[in-house]
Amino acid sequence: MRIKESLYIFAKYQSDIAFLFQTLMDLGYHVKGDGDWTPKERVHYVTIYNTVLLNICSFVEEYDNHFLAFAESEFKQRVLSVKKIAKPAYKKVKEWKGLQQYRNNMIAHTLRIDKDEFSFSKLGDYDSPRTYLELVIIRKYFMMVYTIILMEFDEELSTINNFARNFNQKNPPRKHEDAEVELKRVVEEINSLLEDYNSGKYLLLDQFEKL
């Protein structure tokens, strides 16, 4: 059922974003001053921040491109009702005109624009949330949209996890029984190449050999 695909996607992103915000608050990131961050905390915060924006972009893509188009005929009127009711909040989400561009150039793809220009040359030009406050604001509007979806499709969403479990998960294609042996072999090969170049440098086997 295609409508359940969209509903699962919406529910997943809503849940992920809720847990990401809870992590921000549990760790006190939302109240830290500019000089209070360790390098590890800053990387962690930026990763969470970017993941929230990435998930909102993915939610928007599903909402715009598939929610109505993929819905079975018996659900189309209900989807149209959701879109009409949620429109005031959804318009506020879409006001961030550079959100998709930021996602493409700074998060999801390489840090290159059109495989050429370094993305940081445009840093600050993107019309997307930059501060914790702005992240909270866009999330509030996002939550309004999801709440309208939940109001209309509460029955379908109550069984959405069962729907997802019906998909068979394939076994991983790779096995790694000899991974440590292979790691050692590659380190030795690189050290041999370094020796050929008379670099006087080498990789320490202990850093790479053990898993």
Image (cartoon, helix red, strand yellow):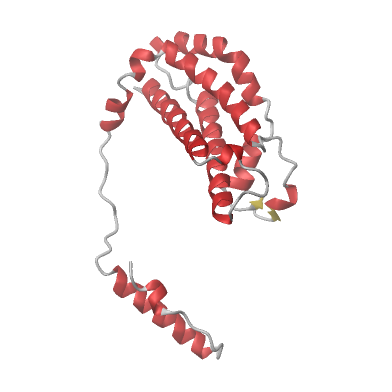
Quarter occupied by the C terminus:
bottom left
Q: Which residue is rendered at x = 51% and y = 34% of the image? A: 21
In the image, residue 175 above or below residue 16: below
Query: Which residue lies at the image location 64% right of the left edge and 35% below the top edge?
Result: 99
Residue 211 visible from this viewpoint: yes
Residue 113 drawn at (x, y percent):
67, 50
Determine whether 126 is above or below 68 in the image. Answer: below
Q: Please report the residue visible at 68 percent of the width from the left and 56 percent of the height from the top.
A: 116
Where is residue 11? Give x, y as percent.
42, 26
Placement of 87 over or under 43, stated as above or below = above
185 versus 144 height, above or below: below
The one nearer the camera, 184 or 72, is 184
**Quarter in which the N terminus is drawn:** top left
**Viewer-closest of 164 and 33:** 33
Question: Quick check: 95 left or right of 14?
Answer: right
Q: Please state which of residues 120 and 23 is positioned toward the viewer in this rendering.
A: 23
Instruction: State the image quarter where residue 117 is shown.
Output: bottom right
- Tell me how many marks there are: 0
79 or 135, nearer to the observer: 135
x, y percentage for residue 195?
Answer: 50, 89
Residue drawn at point x = 58 percent, y = 21 percent: 141
Q: Position of residue 178 (x, y in %)?
A: 26, 70
**Residue 68 visible in the current orientation:** no
